[in-house]
Image (cartoon, grey):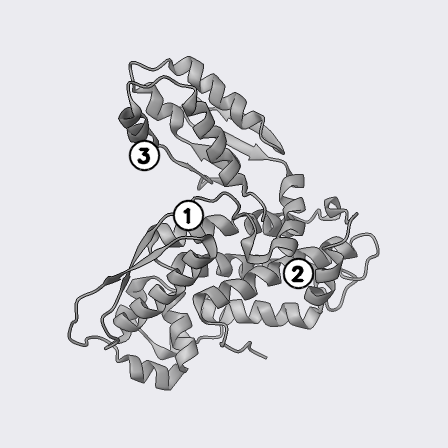
Amino acid sequence: MSISYITEAREALHSTFDAVEFADQAEKAAILREVTLRPPKEKSYGDLSTNTCIILKSKKNIDFKSISEKLVTAFSEMAEVSDVRLEDNGYINIKYSVKHWLNNILLVLSDGLEFGLERIAAKNCVFPAPAEVVDLASFREQANFEALDRIAVLTGAEVVREPLPVREAAGFPHKTAIAKCTEAKTRFAVIANPPGFIDAFSPILAIDRHYDNPVFAIPYARLMLQRLGATAEAAETGMSDGVDMSVLKLPEEVALARLLSDWPLALERSMRKRDAFYLASFLQALSLLFFKLNKRVHPVSSNYLTAEAERPARLCLLGALDVILIGGVRLLGVDAVKEYG
């Protein structure tokens, strides 16, 4: 397995903290609970951002200047980091080289769903599950528990089932939804949307053939990748030495490589939020980026996959994308949903 960039950054942060003298371990633990380290919402800030210095500055018994310099140094020494900035607002923003994201494509191909999971913190998880399925809400709860359980097993976490109380059926009948949409697509629709989706559930909207609908977009992206024939070829190409990934220059190619690297984060977020919707949202974002790339290059009618210099790298990119899409829907338990023709 490979190590995620977020895991390396966390280890750099914790190593710096280990060199700091705190009043006691309780103080250190309390500070760490307040610290965030994650991709910023505004992409122009960088690839990772942390509020560590803001938290430390409020602690009077800590040498803020010393530890902030040590943090910047520790982050700067990580592989493939191109820039680390301590901003005026106290945040540390970290930017990685494009080379880092592009080379991760080969790791996705070799590691599959275990990409980035080495040394990931596997905590015991308590996930809610319904006592029985009586309506669409409990149908979602059961589907969500099963998906979270699969995600936890992949990451090495232990799962404890938190029984939800028995209640009377309410809202849209789940058996009616299944009759109109099929069981697989109903499961996909409720898990790929936030819980509020079931409050105004519509069978028509649930299986609408539109890119904004994950039940359509994710399987359709898989179908397009299958038709391009890139995945099987990439499996062999991506495992060989000497593939020059730097030939991937298009913004959509780089964006796909960058987003694929967030696979471990998508799994973590789903478990932390106790909702597999966040994994489905990640897969949807990948699908939409692929559609943007497809619109730009028209791979079926152009030389996008036949250009000699770029072909191996492009096959690897599309193959890695397919690996994550296929594995992601299996974790969600919706791999039975057929692609649209």
Label 3, label 1: how far apart the Cα atoms are:
17 Å
Looking at the picture, which amino acid does disc 3 mark? Arg
Residue drawn at (55%, 50%) of the image: 259
Q: x%, y% of residue 151?
A: 43, 59
Q: Nearer the viewer, mark 3 or mark 1?
A: 1
Mark nearer the N terminus (3 vs 1): 3
Residue at which label 2 appears: 319
Q: Is residue 271 left or right of residue 220?
A: left
Q: Residues within 10 Å of mark 3 (few under 14, many from 20)?
A: few
Looking at the picture, which amino acid does disc 2 mark? Gly
Q: x%, y% of residue 210?
A: 49, 70
Looking at the picture, which amino acid does disc 1 mark? Ala
Residue 291 visible, this angle: no
Residue at which label 1 appears: 122
Q: Is residue 165 left or right of residue 204?
A: left
Label 2, label 3: how far apart the Cα atoms are:
38 Å
Q: Is residue 221 left or right of residue 135?
A: right
Q: Nearer the viewer, residue 46 or 318?
A: 318
Element at label 1? loop
